[in-house]
Image (tube, grey):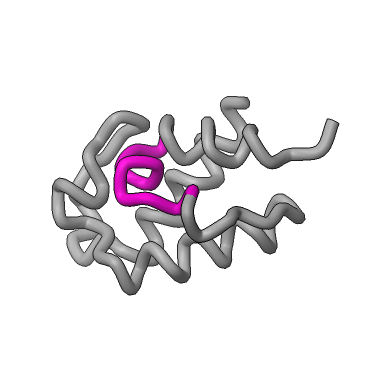
């Protein structure tokens, strides 16, 4: 689980943070905090689907589900095959 959290956190840092010194954590608000916008959320969803070989239905890809790394991990785990 920690590996997935770290992978997602690193992706967000590399793709969406403009200030490389800005620190974010697993509970940092990404969407409500203005780090990830709706367009970026689409690319993040695509990254997750490709990386973890899952398909996230659009109705599940809500701003709330993508607001923190922890909530993203919960979402991904919901669709991972056992």
Residue furthest right as drawn: 82
Is 58 positioned to the left or the right of 39 in the image?
A: right
Task: Please check the rendered image and state whether residue 76 is part of the magenta-colored stretch, yes or no.
Answer: no
Q: Determine the residue positioned at 16% across, 47% down.
A: 32
Is 28 positioned to the left or the right of 59 in the image?
A: left
Q: In which quadrant of the rendered image does the N terminus lie? A: top right
Residue furthest bottom as drawn: 39
Q: Position of residue 61 (x, y in %)?
A: 45, 53
* Numbered circles on residues, count: 0
Q: Position of residue 71 (x, y in %)?
A: 42, 34
Q: Determine the residue positioned at 57% across, 26% down.
A: 2
Q: Quadrant of residue 26?
A: top left
Q: Position of residue 67 (x, y in %)?
A: 30, 43
| Dominant secondary-structure state across the stretch colored magenta | loop
Q: Position of residue 55 (x, y in %)?
A: 68, 56
- Using the image as rendered, state which of residue 82 and residue 58 is in the foreground: 58
Q: Is residue 54 above or below residue 9?
A: below
- Using the image as rendered, state which of residue 12 and residue 58 is in the foreground: 58
Range of residues picked out in magenta? 60-69
Residue furthest front as drawn: 59
- Using the image as rendered, state which of residue 18 and residue 40 is in the foreground: 40
Residue furthest left as drawn: 33
Q: Determine the residue positioned at 38% across, 63% down.
A: 41
Q: In which quadrant of the rendered image does the C terminus lie? A: top right
Is 11 positioned to the left or the right of 62 in the image?
A: right
Q: Is residue 80 above or below residue 13?
A: above
Q: Is residue 35 above or below residue 74?
A: below
């Amino acid at each position: 689980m920690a590996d997935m959290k770290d992978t997602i956190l690193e992706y967000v840092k590399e793709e969406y943070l403009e200030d490389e010194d800005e620190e974010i954590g697993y509970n940092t608000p990404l969407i409500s905090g203005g780090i990830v916008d709706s367009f970026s959320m689409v690319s993040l969803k695509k990254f997750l689907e490709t990386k973890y070989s899952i398909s996230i239905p659009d109705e599940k890809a809500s701003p709330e589900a993508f607001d923190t790394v922890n909530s993203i991990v919960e979402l991904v785990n919901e669709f991972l095959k056992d």
